Image: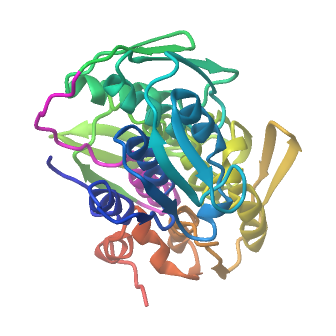
Amino acid sequence: MHNLSDANDTQLMLRLVNATDKVINVEDAGTTMRFLTAYFSVTHQQKILTGTDRMKERPIGILVDALRLLGVEIVYLEKEGYPSHEIKKFAGQKVNTLRIRGDVSSQYISALMMIAPTLPNGLMLELEGKVGSRPYIEMTASLMKHFGVSSTFVGSTITVPSQKYSPASFTVESDWSATSYWFAFAALAEQATIQLPRLSLQSLQGDSAIVKIMEVLGVKAEMKNDLLVLTKQQHQSSIEWDFTHCPDLAQTVAVVCAAKGIEGHFTGLESLRIKETDRIAALQTELQKINADLIEVDAAHWTLKPSKNLPTNAEFKTYKDHRMAMAFAPLASLMDVEIEEPNVVRKSYPNYWNDMKSFGFDIR
């Protein structure tokens, strides 16, 4: 495995996947919680999975219900439908088909896909309702194929036959979620030319949608000599975007729109309620500090009213959410910014502040 991230979530997964301890503390890593719950279940490991107080507020009932139908005995140790929970035993595969909601988190679906080939009868997943973060489901299938496992994803049905994974060398593409913040810096800076390595405009990552979004917000992206080069261009006065398949971009886009006077009309933000924090509420509170508003029009539509008068400085709370810190930091191109709890970036991008320093920002 090459170019593996030094993010805390990644390093935590590496440590815990082979841990012999009975109690597995995933801290604040939602992906780790979901993937390891499925993995430990079908590998006959009796484990207790727990995490931070916020992790215990993030639902896992949809995945646990699916695993129970498969034949896994799992009990909740605190609140029904939420961690902490204990995996007791796997009695053997009881069903070949599972129906699961597609509109909550693609990580539930990816977790079940990855264990499916190890089941004696394979597994068919029927996704119900609106399917969110579809690119991440497709990316899961693509990576499984790289390691020798075939699957099909037709309409709302995923089919994974019983088969064996095969070892293979793999180089991890740079993270488009992290890359999105450099698009924000380019958008907000008076002048900018930013070069980024190990990225592809044909990426399977859902957050590569930032390229099309930022075309509207004033950033041009093109490949030159195997580098992604970002430069400035004219921006439009408004944007409409559905974040269903790229919800982690919403905070970054909202901040850029707020600062550049671009009105936003957004859909697909529903899953932000169950992230590291309630990201919609957090955005609404923090955007007001720069005289902008995120207005909930109805349950599915939000309007971003941009700032008409940026302050000279502002202090932003992070709510223990790495993306709140990194989304608001690019405002330092326009004003003095103070970020509370800056260490939250260790979750996904521990070198974020050092990289900002390398671009000439004064960080204290």
Q: Position of residue 188 (x, y in %)?
A: 52, 60
Instruction: Please name the residue shown 51% across and 54% down the image.
Output: 30
Examine the structure image and report whether residue 122 is included in the region drawn in magenta.
no
Q: Tell me if residue 231 comes above or below residue 90 in the rendering.
A: below
Which is more toward the observer, 181 or 43?
Answer: 43
The residue sitting at 28% across, 35% down in the picture is: 200
Quadrant assignment, res 191:
bottom left
Magenta segment: 164-191
Q: Quadrant of the C terminus?
A: bottom left
Task: Using the rendered view, name the quadrant where residue 63 is placed.
Answer: top right
Q: Is residue 179 magenta?
A: yes
* Whole-percent x, y for residue 179 in the image: 39, 52
How far across and how far down the image is residue 233, in percent? 47, 44
Residue beneath the point at 59% across and 62% down:
55
Does residue 331 appear anywhere in the picture? yes
Residue ID at (46%, 43%): 89
- 43 sits left or right of 336 in the view: left
Placement of 21 over or under 172, stated as above or below:
below
By what rule are the colours in the image chosen? Answer: rainbow
